[in-house]
Amino acid sequence: MAGIYIHIPFCKSKCLYCDFFSSVDLFLIPDFIFAVNREMEIMHAYLDDEQVETIYFGGGTPSLLSPDDLSALLNRVKSLFPVSENSEITVEVNPDDLSLTYALRLLESGFNRISIGVQSLSDRILGTLGRRHDAASAIAAIHNAVSAGFKNISVDLIYGIPGLANEQWIDTLKQLLSLPVQHLSAYHLTIEKNTPLHRLVFSGRFKPVHEKISEQHYLSLIEICGNCGFRQYEVSNFAYPGFVSRHNTNYWKHKKYLGIGPGAHSFNLYARRWNSKNILGYLNGVQNNQIPFESEILTPTDHFNEYILTGLRTTDGINMDEIRKLFGEYFYQHCINIAKELIQPDISTFDGRVFRLLARGLFLSDSVIVQFMQSNDSSVKTDGFSRTDA
């Protein structure tokens, strides 16, 4: 079981908070499409013919591409890789791009899951975030997806925003989850370096919310989602039964995946690689049958730390028997000892076999995860090119 991620790096404008690699140079889209097709040809053997169960078009803003362009890229994936008949095929869209006609074309092209970047149902908050859509277009986008025939609709929200009262946050959740959506991803606003928002904070023109407000937002998120039938399965992800994101779940379960496009990451069980974020360098490299990338060969300690990081972000937690089987007695005893020390009624549970974080523990997960992790100075980093003369 493997996944493919295609990064569409283009945006009409850059949101204040976003640190994902993106470009506003839309005139590069034709060259980009050529390069992505060529990269898929170069990397077609990376997954060792393992069946592809999930395909994800993310960004950036994939919905800046025409339905024909997205369809052609998807068909190229299917022609080069063994894609399962019941594969999950997701595309991210900006609300004001998703007309009924556009949604119909996506469904006809083979996309069966759609992720809509709602972020907020407050025009004031959307303005604060620098989003280009309004609340009405977000709601309209959901209805257009439903009318087109999509049965698997995910929406994104952001909380922990200055000026967002908890009562307003609760109202947003109730309103959104009353709509015909099956999955919710909700993320705390993060101040990432080298973003416009980071510069505003540094200049004193933007003040992050207090941690108590953040925690209040998060606990309200869990409560409202539960009341609406959405089961939490990861720190930021909630779904109706049967509608978890298979693509993201495979990341957390350490399945193989291939990332295509500038800045995209790949994993083949023993090493990670990531493409250059320089879009012109990427385009020029691929045109010369070279993919500029960096890579890191993972050590046993790296694998252990990633197991801890991903496991404790999910509601399944970490399994001591699995740790012993995968990593050996030393890591097993280390985790047993740490788990016993961290048992707290409102933070975590440990039955001697599985250590899980509860609602408040998930909010504090970073501080818990670091206590399980092991230091590692022996990972090998490389950089270079993937090359083919084909």
Image (cartoon, rainbow, N blue to C red):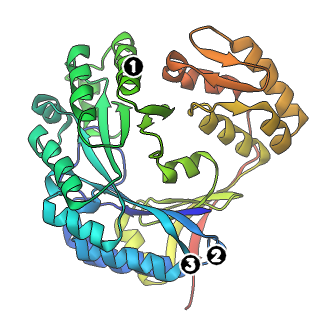
Q: Which residue is mark 1?
A: 223
Relative image position of residue 288 (x, y in whole percent): 46, 84
Res 192 seen here: no
Q: Which quadrant would residue 100 be assigned to in this image?
A: bottom left
Q: Residues within 10 Å of mark 1 (few under 14, many from 20)?
A: some
Compare marks 3 and 2 and give the one earlier in the sequence: 3
Q: Residue at x 39, y 74 (%)?
A: 74
Compare marks 2 and 1 and give the one earlier in the sequence: 2
Amino acid at circle 2: Asp
| Disc number for residue 44 | 3
Relative image position of residue 324 (x, y in whole percent): 85, 37
In contact (CB < 8 Å): disc 2 and disc 1: no
Q: Nearer the viewer, residue 327 or 261?
A: 327
* Label 2 element class: loop
Q: Nearer the viewer, residue 84 or 299?
A: 84
Compare marks 1 and 3 and give the one earlier in the sequence: 3
- Of the 4 image quadrants, the one containing the C terminus is bottom right
Q: Is residue 201 above or below residue 265?
A: above
In contact (CB < 8 Å): disc 3 and disc 2: no
Q: Residues within 10 Å of mark 2 (few under 14, many from 20)?
A: some
Q: Nearer the viewer, residue 153 or 166?
A: 153
Q: Residue at x 66, y 17 (%)?
A: 349
Q: Residue furthest right?
A: 329
Amino acid at circle 1: Glu
Q: Is residue 353 above or below residue 323?
A: above
Q: Is residue 242 left or right of residue 94?
A: right
Q: Residue at x 50, y 19 (%)?
A: 359
Relative image position of residue 267 (x, y in whole percent): 61, 59
Q: Which quadrant would residue 70 be assigned to in this image?
A: bottom left
